[in-house]
Image (spheres, coloured by chain):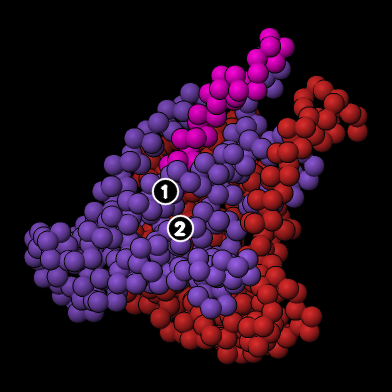
Amino acid sequence: MNALTLPFRPLGSERIDPLLVVLWIVLVAIAIVWIAPFVFIAFTSLKTTAQIAQTSPFSPPLTPAWENFSKAWARGNFSSAVFNSTLITLIKVPLGLFISAMAAYSLSRIEFAGQRLIYLLILFGTMIPFQVMLAPIFGVVNDFHLINSYVGVILPYLAFGVPYQVFILHGFFKEVPRELSEAAQIDGASHFTIFLRIFLPLSLPVLSALLILDFVATWNEFAMALVILQDNRLWTLPLSLMSFQTQFSRDYGQLNAAIIMTVLPAIIVYMIFQRYFVSGLTSGAIKE
Amino acid sequence: MNGITRSPLVQGLLLLAPALIVYGIFAFYPMLDVVKLSFMKWNGLTPTMQFVGLDNFRDIFTIDTVFWGALRNTVIWTVLSLLVPPFIGFVLALALNQRLWGRVALRAIFYLPVIIAPIAVATIWRWMYDPFFGLFNQLLAGWGLANLALDWLGDRKIALYSIFAGSVWQTAGFSMVLFLAGLQNVSQTLVEAARIDGAGRWSIFRYVTLPALRPSITVVLILSFINSLKAFDIVYGTTGGGPAQSTQMLAMWSYTQALQLGNFGNGSAISVVLLIVTIAIVIPYLRWSLRQEEKTR
């Protein structure tokens, strides 16, 4: 590492810029504010109700009340919620990405009449917040007699995942050089084979980015699950947390343990796959 | 392989079909269905529904005592969402684009709330606002400012803004990441050239950085607009629209009317109002972004 890449030196200079040092101190202060809620939640989750009343918010739990976690787990029926969330996410995310990728391939690499219109109709979906349409979504799922079923929530999840993924992958597939697919076509391969053997492996980085983003979005989804999964045996983690909050809001320690159990999987995935988040968000959104 | 499956059209449609069918039925059709439902009287359970013309719209505009308050709150929420988190995200991105120690870790911290479930953000903030043991009133008491302690979510004058603070915490990192990506497009040679020509920090920002960020600014604003209409979970999980409907918003009022009160007609009419506003803003943006896409071809 040479002096030019050291921190606090502006581009092309070897001197420390005092303004950058001040800026850094301000940023660190804001970062502490930003992370304070997490510290507060983590500390509270390990305190008994008496400790919460007596100690200050940021005093660490010296005798951790681990039982908050096991009690919240049992009272909030979290084993069933974790199972439901995991099952729904594991089916929805890979399946959704696969059908989106096929559609994006079809719309970008095969020419047929009307595909521009279809692409625009799908693109339109990236702009419509489904939270606005919970009543008709309930109506459609109800028409198929799928209220209170895994399929009933997975199908709308798939539907609302398609637009953004098709948009990103369409942009990516379009850039793949023609020669790659033409050579295979001359050898007699079908489009499905070309898609499977050439385009999917080629787009692994984009697919991983979309996979991670979709995992978090599906894991966190609340409104649609609220409308479709009314039977509490089918509840996902967000629904269970909400119910826990309403029922046991005075058991502060356990409530905070429940919060941690709900958000931890997403945080772990984020920690491991951090760089994919940024590329997934920006690969399609920002282009000049 | 026989002749039919060799045709590009058939192959194309087969690949397209699964996504298109599921999107068509469960995402696009509801958009049309909500318009139909807005002209109907229906409780969501009976097999038949009754056509009532524009009655539902008349109801929500004239009889519904909550609608206008919810509309007002939605407008306030949307305007604030377009101003505050993008501005914070912008400043954070500019700062984190400098050569600073530990900037990767700092970025990760600011982005962390983005990946948390909105309903968990609601739970976290509701607990921090707890009048007795919550973080805010405890801190104020600890600093000897107990007289400033407020009933953050129980006071109708401030409840909406209290919820919005949670939303800022959750969404600023999202704008930041998009702006950071946009900053990668700022030509370093241009910055360097301007510096050698004697341009100050402000001039470089004003005449080099800012123009290069224009596409990012548009994208961030449009995404913030759409996300602000999605403000459902955070309200549901903090106040449920209370106290006395003072934090009610259109998306949640539509849900409440249709699925809680069994009045699908009124609920759908509210959704239609929201959809029309959304489409009016989104269509010009889509045309703009398609033009951008064509330019890069």
Q: Residue at x 56, y 66 (%)?
A: B145
- Residue A224: image quadrant is bottom left
Per the picture, the main secondary structure of the magenta-coloured stretch is: helix
Magenta segment, which residues? B195-224
Residue B95's x, y, as percent?
Answer: 66, 37
Image check: B225 left or right of A260?
left
What is the three-letter code of the residue carrying label 2? Answer: Phe
Check the image and report above or below for B271 versus A60.
above
Residue A194's x, y, as percent?
Answer: 61, 44
Q: Give yes or no for contact between labels 2 and 1 (Cβ–Cβ under 8 Å).
A: yes
Q: Which residue is mark 2?
A: B164
Q: Which residue is mark 1?
A: B80
Q: Chain ID for label 1?
A: B
**Colour representing chain B:** purple
Of residues A285 and B83, the one drawn nearer to the viewer in this rendering: B83
Q: Which chain is rendered red in the image? A: A
Res A219 seen here: no
Q: Chain ID for label 2?
A: B
What is the three-letter code of the residue carrying label 1? Answer: Leu
